[in-house]
Amino acid sequence: MGGSVLRLLERRSVLLVVLLALVIVVMSLISPYFFSVTNLLGITQFGAVLVLLAIGQSLVITSGRGGIDLSIGSMLSLSGVAIGMLVQQGVNVWLASFLGIVSGGLFGALNGLMVAYIGLPPLITTLGTNYLYGSLALYLTNGVPISGFPESFEFLGQGLILGIPAQVLLVALPVFALFWFIVYRTRFGREIYLIGTNEIAARFSAIQVKQIRFSLYTISGLLAGLGSVIMCSWLMTARADVGSGMDMQSITVSVLGGVSITGGQGHLASVMLAVLVVTMLSSGMQIANINSMWQLAILGMILLFAVALNQFVLKRSASK
């Protein structure tokens, strides 16, 4: 029995499927409205942006050397504000969206420049830019949401295709498939894991460590920019606080998905499952009218559990 439990803990994807089933059962007992096809498909809408942020966060963490992006939520907010301001100036909404994604990439590139080339600690660097980008978003909007998006724009964030949210089918799943291919079928992906496992060995293998690490922070910013497009379409406003807390959520699902905080380990498929677990749990608690204070406490406990679990698995692997 004990051996079966240990094997379950080590097989992260199986563990997450069990947790997902457990969350669905418990929330269905708490609220009779939870377990329905319509509601479950609708809940995936809440996870679409988180999937994008979690992919970027996971790749940064996997690259090792304390890699982390605490500014990803602020980049989401500031990119959205950029889109809103461009639309207010009469720019076509899709062109503005493209420029918003590019701006996210530039914000991420600034993080990458400071971390990869200047050598600043990722935690302090992205904490600083988190304050910088968040403050700039508030300054540009004065804390007032920017509206005026055309009605044709709302389909991406609010529309349904065969009952499935458009943002899931048109953005989240294609982006996940793209990065799954890049990470697990290309040399670039193999180099990310090698850098995270042993940076010195990577350098001796003629891998451009600084360039790859810079690229990963830029990718994180681009995905935050893409997430801002979805959020603007979903809310039909650009808000300076829309990314608040999403940095911690992206870290939580990355670590819960098995991404080692020390780098070099983890799989995007498990991260996707972790997004479903956290999204289902959060939505279920909202439906059950659980106080938001307790929702944050539960999210914190999940993060602590995930880190402890990862450390346990690493120690087990080392002992073997």
Image (spheres, grey):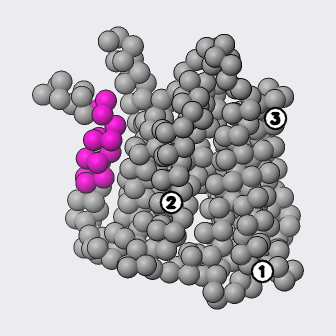
10 Å crowding of disc 2: few (<14), some (14-19), many (20+): few
**Closest to the observer, 23 or 107:** 107
Residue 225: x percent and y percent? 69, 59
Residue 44 belongs to magenta span = no
Give residue 114's mark. Answer: 3
Write down the region rendered in magenta. Answer: 9-22
Q: Secondary structure at mark 2?
A: helix
Quadrant where the C terminus is found in the figure: top left
The main secondary structure of the magenta stretch is helix
Q: Earlier in the sequence, mark 1 or mark 2?
A: 1
Would you say 203 lies left or right of 287 here? right
Residue on which disc 1 sits: 92
Would you say 273 lies left or right of 299 here? left
Q: Viewer-nearest of labels 3 and 2?
A: 2
Residue 18 belongs to magenta span = yes
Q: Earlier in the sequence, mark 3 or mark 1?
A: 1
The relative height of residue 187 versus residue 35 in the rendered view (above or below) is above
| Residue 62 picture quarter | top right
